[in-house]
Amino acid sequence: MRTAFVRIAALLPGRVDLADLRRDPRRDLLAGLTVAIVALPLALGFGVSSGLGAEAGLATAVVAGALAAVFGGSNLQVSGPTGAMTVVLVPIVGEFGPAGVLTVGLMAGALLIAVAALRAGKYMQYVPAPVVEGFTLGIACVIGLQQLPNALGVPKPDGDRVLVVAWRAVEEFARHPNWTAVGFSVAVAVVMLAGARWRPTVPFSILAVVAATVVAQAAGLDAATPIGDLPSGLPVPSLSFLDLGSLGTLLAPAVAVAALAALESLLSASVADGMTVGQKHDPDRELFGQGVANLATPLFGGVPATGAIARTAVNVRSGASSRLAALTHAAVLAVIVFAAAPLVSKIPLAALAGVLLATAVRMVEVGSLKAMAKATRSDALILVLTAVATLVLDLVLAVIIGLAVAGALALRAVAKHARFDQVPLDRGDHSAEEHALLAEHIVAYRIDGPLFFAAAHRFLLELTEVADVRVVILRMSRVSTMDATGALVLKDAVEKLERRGIRVLASGLRPGHRQVLDSVGALDLLHRDGREYATTPEAIRGARDHLETAGVLTVVAPRSARTADEETAR
C-alpha cells in the first residue's frame, strides 16, 4: 500500500505545471475558446447518442475536461465524451440502464488509477499501426451508423447492435419519410466538410448548428425535433445511482470501458505530441488523470470520458501551449450550461446528427489507409479484420483480435527468418585428405535467429533427417533467443540422434540460453561426456577424438609433427 501511495503521489501535478500556465496565457485562452465552440455540438451529440441525453454530454465535457487537464499527462490533451466511448456505452445502457453506465464509469476510473500506479502506460507503444487504423475506421463507421435514426428523423429502434438499429431506422424512414430532418443533417454535414477544406480555422460546426436552429425555430418546423429541456447548471454530486449489488455484474463492462479510455487517451496524447515540437506526454500520468476524471464525472451525471483526438487536434492547431487551454474549454462550456441552457435545448437533433456524420467522415484518413494497405498483405489483413470486428462485435474485442492476429503474423515472419544451414568444416590444421575423411563422418549446422515455439518444430524435422554421419555439431553462437519449446525440441533432437548412434556436440552456447536449457534438462544432456564446447574448432577436435576412440578414424599425428619426422627420416 505504501508503494502504491508513493507512486500515485509522483503522478500528481507539480510546480512545473503551474509555471507552464503562465507561459503564454493569451494564446491558451483563445485556443480554449476555439475548442469549446467546436466541442459544444460534439458534447451534445455524443450525450444524445449514449442514451443518457445531451445534459450528460455537457456534464462530461465540463467535469472530465477540467480534471483531466489538471491531473493528466499531456499539456495539450482535451478530454470529454467521444464517439468511440459512445459505441461501448449504448449496449450498457440497453442492458443496465443509466445507473449502470454511471456505475461503470466510476469503476473504470478506479481501474485506470490502478493501472497508472502499476506504470503500465508505456505498453501502449506496442500497439501496431494497422490495429490503430482499423480501429479508427471501424469507429467512424459505427458513429455514422448510430446517427441514422436522428438524421432520418425517426424514433430510435430497439436493439444494441448498430447494424440492426441502422437497418430498422432505414425501414421506418421508408414507411414514414421525414425529409426535413434529412435536409438538416445533410446540410450541416456538407457545410462542415466543405468549410473545413475552405477555411480550416473557422468553427463551421457551431455556425451550421446555429443556422439550423434559427431556421427550425423561425419556420416552426415540427419535423425538426429539438434536443429538449436542459438543466441550467450541473447537478449536485451524488452517489444515489450506485447499486452495490450489481458491481460484480458490471465488472466486465467496466474493464472494457477502462481499456478503451486508456487506448483512446494515449493515442490522442501521442497524436498531440506528433503535431508539436518539444511536447511529450507522460503515459502513466495521463492514465491517472483519466481515472480521476472518470471517478468524478458520474457523480455529476456524466458518461465515461477519454482524451478526444478531434478536440485535441483543434487545440494544437489553435496555438495551445499548456493545460490552460483545456481548462478554458471546460470553463466556457460550464458558462454555456449555466447561462444558455434554454437556447441550447432548441437545437434540432438532426443538426447534431449532421455534426457527428461529418465527424465520422473526417476521422477516416484515406491516405493512411492506402499506405497501410499497400505496405504488406499482413498489414492490410490486420487493418480489415480490426475494422470489421469493431463494426460487428465491440471495440475492446476488436483491438484484442487485431493484436492477436498481428502477433501471430509477426511470429510467423520471425520464424521464417530463422535459418538452419549446413556449413563446411573449418580446415584448421588438417590436410586435404584428413579434411575429406572427417567430412564423411562429421556434419556442422549453424542456427541463425530465434529458436522458439514458432520455428522449433521445423528445426526438429530438419535435424532428425540427418543421415550417414557419426557426429553432428550444432553451432549456436548466432541463436538470438530461445524459449522452453525450443529447448525441449533441441533436447528431443539430441536424444533421437543419440538413439541412432549419432553423437551431438554443441558450440558457442550463450550464457543467456543456459537457464532455459537447464530448466528442461537439455543442459545436462550436453554436459554429459563433455559435449559442449566454447568454439567450433574445439568442437571439431572433440568430434575427431570421438571418431578416433570409436575406431572410425586412425590416430594421425598433427601435420607439423609428421613433416618434422619425415625430414628426420630423409
Image: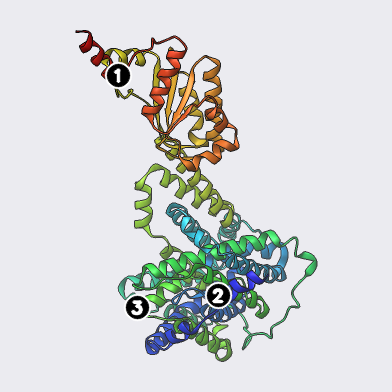
SS class of the residue under badge 3?
Answer: loop
Q: CA distance from mark 3 to mark 1?
A: 79 Å
Asked if residue 177 shows in the view, the reply is no
Q: Residue 10: which numbered mark, if any?
A: 2
Q: Which residue is mark 1?
A: 430
Q: Are marks 3 and 1 in contact (CB under 8 Å)?
A: no
Q: Which residue sits at x=39%, y=73%? A: 279
Instruction: Tell which of 558 and 86 is nearer to you.
Output: 558
Q: Quadrant of the C terminus?
A: top left
Q: Amino acid at mark 3?
A: Thr
Q: Amino acid at mark 1?
A: His
List x then y, in percent, for residue 259: 58, 61
How dense is the environment of label 2, judged by Cα within 10 Å: few (below 14), some, or many (20 and up)?
few
The answer to whether residue 491 is above or below residue 158 is above
Q: Which residue sits at x=59%, y=32%? A: 521
Instruction: Tell me if 525 is positioned left or right of 549 in this view.
Output: right
> Residue 94's image quarter?
bottom right
Instruction: Tell me if 349 is positioned left or right of 434 in this view.
Output: right
Q: Which residue sits at x=68%, y=58%? A: 252
Q: Which residue is mark 3?
A: 201
SS class of the residue under badge 1?
Answer: loop
In the rendered image, the residue lying farthest to the front is 568
In the rendered image, the residue lying farthest to the bottom is 339
Q: Amino acid at mark 2?
A: Ala
Q: CA distance from mark 2 to mark 3?
A: 38 Å
Asked if residue 110 shows in the view, the reply is yes
In the rendered image, the residue lying farthest to the right is 245
SS class of the residue under badge 2?
Answer: helix
Q: Nearer the viewer, mark 3 or mark 1?
A: 1
Q: Earlier in the sequence, mark 3 or mark 1?
A: 3
Q: Earlier in the sequence, mark 2 or mark 1?
A: 2
